[in-house]
Image (spheres, rainbow, N blue to C red):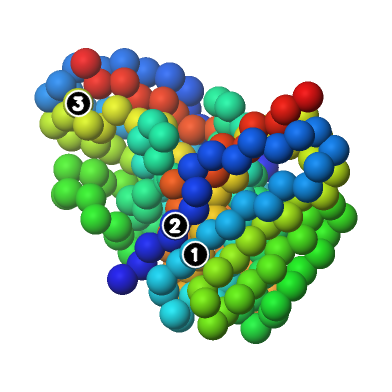
């Protein structure tokens, strides 16, 4: 177990709605990354948050947005949901800027979003 | 561009060795990883290798890196039923940067 927790674990929304997913990072980690994993695919990088600011973004539209809080927890918000947003959303925490960092990500178990 | 390719499926008999292969395109890849995902779970880091290494062994796991051909492999010795999972190859040029994942190889264990 990594110590990264995500909520909710499952949720169902309808097209056009908005969703907020939450993540608590592993103790001692200062960075949170969000990934989208569609069925049968590998995780796709959405964005990374470091020091409460976006620190890199993948090829996702602006309706995907996020926040990082002073305690390093994070939220992923998706507006105007589309059917193709149905996926497992994975949060991963890591440690940036410290010696000995191997860049590895510690993943939560994900939030499975179904858009109808 | 950044791309990581791996075969989608591998079937192995219990007790045999499993070899999962991966190729990547980013010549600036510095860190390469193998992650394991069991059904309904997140990803778990199995092992990693730096690009200046050719091989890394960790108990039943052996990672081989051919940097010239941009080829990475994961060998699991004495494969057990508990090894049944999806294995993702991943890379990054910078340990503080995003990690690029392949689509995963589903390892199926035959009795």
Estimate the x, y position of residue A29 in percent, counting from the top left. Answer: 59, 56
Q: Chain of mark 3?
A: A
Tell me which numbered mark, 1 or 2, is placed earlier along the sequence.
2
Estimate the x, y position of residue A89 in percent, counting from the top left. Answer: 40, 36
Residue at (23%, 50%) from the top-left corner? Answer: A60
Separation of marks 3 and 1 at Cα, in angstroms: 31 Å
> Which residue carries the number 1 mark?
B23
Q: Nearer the viewer, residue B65 or B9?
A: B9
Query: Number of numbered discs present?
Result: 3
> Which residue carries the number 3 mark?
A83
Eyeballing the image, is B54 above or below B105? below
Depth-wise, is mark 3 or mark 2 nearer the camera? Answer: 2
Q: Chain of mark 2?
A: B
Q: Nearer the viewer, residue B78 or A53?
A: B78
Eyeballing the image, is B82 above or below A52? above
Relative to A116, B34 lies left or right: right
Element on which disc 1 rests: strand
Residue at (85%, 43%) from the top-left corner? Answer: B78
Dot 1 alpha-carbon crowd within 10 angstroms: few under 14, some 14 to 19, many 20 or more: many
> Which residue carries the number 2 mark?
B5
């Amino acid at each position: 177990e990594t110590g990264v927790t995500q909520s909710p674990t499952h949720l169902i929304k309808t097209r056009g709605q908005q969703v907020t997913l939450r993540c608590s990072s592993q103790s001692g980690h200062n960075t949170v990354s969000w990934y989208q994993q569609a069925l049968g695919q590998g995780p796709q990088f959405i964005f990374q948050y470091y020091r409460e600011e976006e620190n890199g973004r993948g090829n996702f539209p602006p309706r995907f947005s996020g926040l990082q809080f002073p305690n390093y927890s994070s939220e992923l918000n998706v507006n105007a949901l589309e059917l193709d947003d149905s996926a497992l959303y994975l949060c991963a925490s890591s440690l940036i800027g410290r010696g000995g960092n191997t860049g590895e990500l510690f993943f939560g178990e994900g939030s499975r979003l179904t858009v109808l | 561009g950044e791309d990581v390719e791996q075969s989608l499926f591998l079937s192995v008999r219990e007790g045999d060795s499993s070899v999962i292969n991966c190729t990547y395109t980013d010549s600036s890849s510095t860190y390469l990883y193998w992650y394991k995902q069991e059904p309904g779970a997140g990803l778990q880091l199995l092992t990693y290798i730096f690009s200046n290494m050719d091989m890394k062994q960790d108990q039943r796991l052996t990672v081989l890196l051919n940097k010239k051909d941009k080829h990475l492999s994961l060998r699991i010795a004495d494969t057990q039923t508990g090894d049944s999972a999806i294995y993702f190859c991943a890379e990054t040029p910078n340990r503080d940067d995003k990690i690029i994942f392949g689509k995963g190889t589903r390892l199926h264990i035959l009795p």
